[in-house]
Image: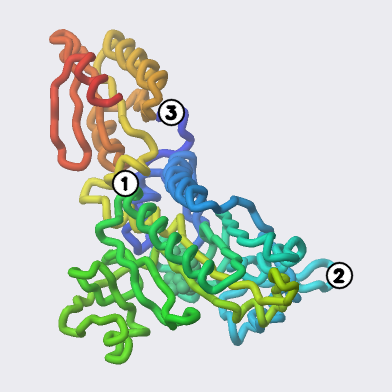
Amino acid sequence: MRLSKLFTKTSKTAPADEVSKNAQLLIRAGFIHKEMAGVYSYTPLGLKVLNKITQIVREEMDAIGCQELIMSGLQKKETWDATGRWDDNNVDIWFKSELKDGTKVGFGWSHEEPIIEMVKQYLSSYKDLPVNVYQFQTKFRNETRAKSGIIRGREFVMKDMYSCNASAEANQAFYDATIEAYNRIYDRLGIGEDTYVTFASGGAFTKFSHEFQTVCDAGEDYIYIHRGKNIAVNEEVMDDENLEKLGIKREELEKVKSAEVGNIFNFGTQKSEDTDFTFTDADNKKQFVHLSSYGIGTTRVMGVIAEKFSDEKGLVWPEAVAPAKVYLISIGGEAAIKCADDLYNELGAKGIDVLYDDRDVRPGQKFADFDLIGIPYRVTVSDRMLESENYELVARADGQQLLLTREQLLAKLV
Ligand code: ATP
Ligand code: MG
């Protein structure tokens, strides 16, 4: 990608009404555009990051045997009536509208009820189970407060996955496998060390659901972490009875601010009973489906990474989600430009993503934008360095600087 071809530009300032650090940095660096409070668009640069996050999540979902689909954003009232969740008294974040003929429709804030409606059409016998499906989809929620940038959107992207199983045991086994998959996802995203499997209220059998909470000052939750056991409890379940059930003591816990980056929920057969979601077992008897649902806010994850990996100069993307690996700069005359063009093509051919700052601007501006955009490595080619056949390689995270020959540089980057 050539910077001169990007229609977005970096900026020294963010909109005056933008109070969150993640959105301020992402807007200034040209990753997102603010439409209104809680509503953001993703620019080509921002989409690169979101796509990398998406791909990591997709690979781990596929690895445990899930299939990807995309469900509709517009939903029918009737689908939600069975569980009482069309009612604004039960769900207070609906955006609703109606068709020209007066038929009521809702903008999807979740897809639990719609997925039941869909799978019902195809499910008859136990031989059709399990069904594990997921999607990356824009959700609409009329959130009261939207002051946390892309950490809390009124429109945001969620990976939601739903599992349908024939027995409580199969449901629980898949639930446990998903916890492991989620741990791998957060590890790969670079936030594994700070992300805790957190016991929350709800859920069949164990009476707990699980949140994945990342320690983060910009988060909106508080959790109590147990460093020894690498688990946490949220505020809802922070009482003596629950702590005893979990075998942990109050004085072993540390209260921290956190952001919920994922949430999984075992419904058992409760939702299936509400919606008459059934199959016939081997004895031809009608049984209720065991259902679980599993969410990850992919745009929220991007916001949390932006918050955690940044400094006074700008963003510092972990390599796995960075929009490119290398930020290439040329300084000086034609020889340096020709050499940078060459290197850009060579790295591209070797599969290395390069953001090439080929703009006709001062070097100081290029260096400042490298820091703001937060690409892991900066490679500088200048007339002077070419005389000694050297390239400068600087790491964004720790500022480490090396002078390398072309061969050494390629060995380092490829
Ligand atoms: P919260 O308590 O933060 O409102 P929630 O319990 O409503 O979250 P779920 O309905 O379980 O969240 O959604 C699954 C995941 O989607 C969450 O774990 C979070 O990562 C993400 N998410 C939820 N609401 C938002 C939002 N308004 N903006 C961005 N991501 C969100
Ligand atoms: Mg919510």
Q: Quadrant of residue 343?
A: top left
Residue 12's disc number? 1
The quadrant of the rendering that contains the N terminus is top left
Q: CA distance from mark 1 to mark 2?
A: 49 Å
Badge 3: how crowded within 10 Å, few (<14), some, or many (20+)?
some
The relative height of residue 335 versus residue 25 in the rendered view (above or below) is above
Task: Identify which residue is drawn at 30% across, 89% down.
Answer: 239
The kind of residue on which mark 3 rests is: Met
Q: Quadrant of residue 409?
A: top left
The quadrant of the rendering that contains the C terminus is top left
Q: CA distance from mark 3 to mark 2?
A: 48 Å
Position of residue 193 in the picture relative to residue 208 (left or right): left
Residue under pointer 3: 1
Labelled pair 3, 2 in contact (Cβ < 8 Å):
no
Task: Identify which residue is drawn at 29% across, 56% down.
Answer: 192
Closer to us: 78 or 324: 78
Earlier sequence position, callout 1 versus callout 2 = 1
Residue 101's disc number? 2
The kind of residue on which mark 2 rests is: Asp
Q: Position of residue 256 (x, y in %)?
A: 24, 73
Could one spot residue 15 in this view of the protein? no
The relative height of residue 175 versus residue 249 in the rendered view (above or below) is above
Q: Position of residue 187 (x, y in %)?
A: 32, 52
Q: CA distance from mark 3 to mark 1?
A: 22 Å
Discs 3/1, front: 3
Task: Identify which residue is drawn at 22% across, 77% down.
Answer: 255
Position of residue 107 in the picture relative to residue 17 (left or right): right
